[in-house]
Amino acid sequence: MEDLCKIRDIYRAIAEFETQFIQQYNLSLNEGMLLCALLEHPRLTSGEIAEELGLTHSNTSKLIRSVEEKKLIARVVGKIDKRQMHFSLTSEGKEQINAIKSSTHEMPALLHQVISMLEK
């Protein structure tokens, strides 16, 4: 039961962080993680994005659409096979992810502890 209470505390800290993140950047955590994934891997298919973020294909499609509407990512159609679709960061998306990376936002102390434990 103690572990369940710890998980609840972590969930609350993540929810608090996401609220602040949305207010500061107008992005959900999943949207921010999509930008990070594309920064690390400049061209990803929707299936690769789903796998990278641990989302269903349906949720990934909604996520991609949302970030496309914000003009932070763009579709890149395959040159040989037009059905081969990749996604990449736009210049606005690169600016946004760099702003997030260079910003010092308040992360709840509990999240710092969890991240420290994961890094070990």
Image (cartoon, grey):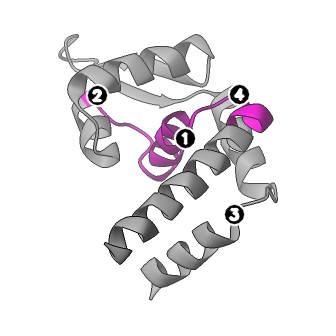
Label 3, residues with CA under 10 Å away: few <14, some 14-19, many ≥20: some
- Marks 2/4: CA–CA distance: 22 Å
- Name the image quarter holding residue 69: top right
- Relative height, residue 76 to residue 96 (above, below): above
Q: Earlier in the sequence, mark 3 or mark 1?
A: 1
Q: Nearer the viewer, residue 13 or 112?
A: 13
Residue 108 numbered mark, or none: 3
Q: Secondary structure at mark 4?
A: loop
- Marks 3/1: CA–CA distance: 15 Å
Q: Position of residue 1 (x, y in %)?
A: 31, 72
Instruction: Please report contact status of discs 3 and 1: CB closer than 8 Å, yes or no.
Output: no
Q: Earlier in the sequence, mark 3 or mark 2?
A: 2
Q: Which residues are magenta?
A: 22-46
Instruction: Please name the residue shown 54% across and 39% down the image.
Output: 35
Q: Is residue 13 left or right of residue 65?
A: right
Residue with the most extreme front position: 1
Looking at the picture, which amino acid does disc 4 mark? Asn
Disc 3 or disc 4, which is closer to the eye?
Answer: 3
Q: Secondary structure at mark 3?
A: loop
> Circle 2 is placed at which residue position?
46
Q: Secondary structure at mark 2?
A: helix
Disc 2 or disc 1, which is closer to the eye?
Answer: 1
Q: Earlier in the sequence, mark 2 or mark 1?
A: 1
Looking at the picture, which amino acid does disc 2 mark? Ser
Res 66 seen here: yes
Residue 29 numbered mark, or none: 1
- Relative height, residue 40 to residue 58 (above, below): below
Instruction: Please report contact status of discs 2 and 4: CB closer than 8 Å, yes or no.
Output: no
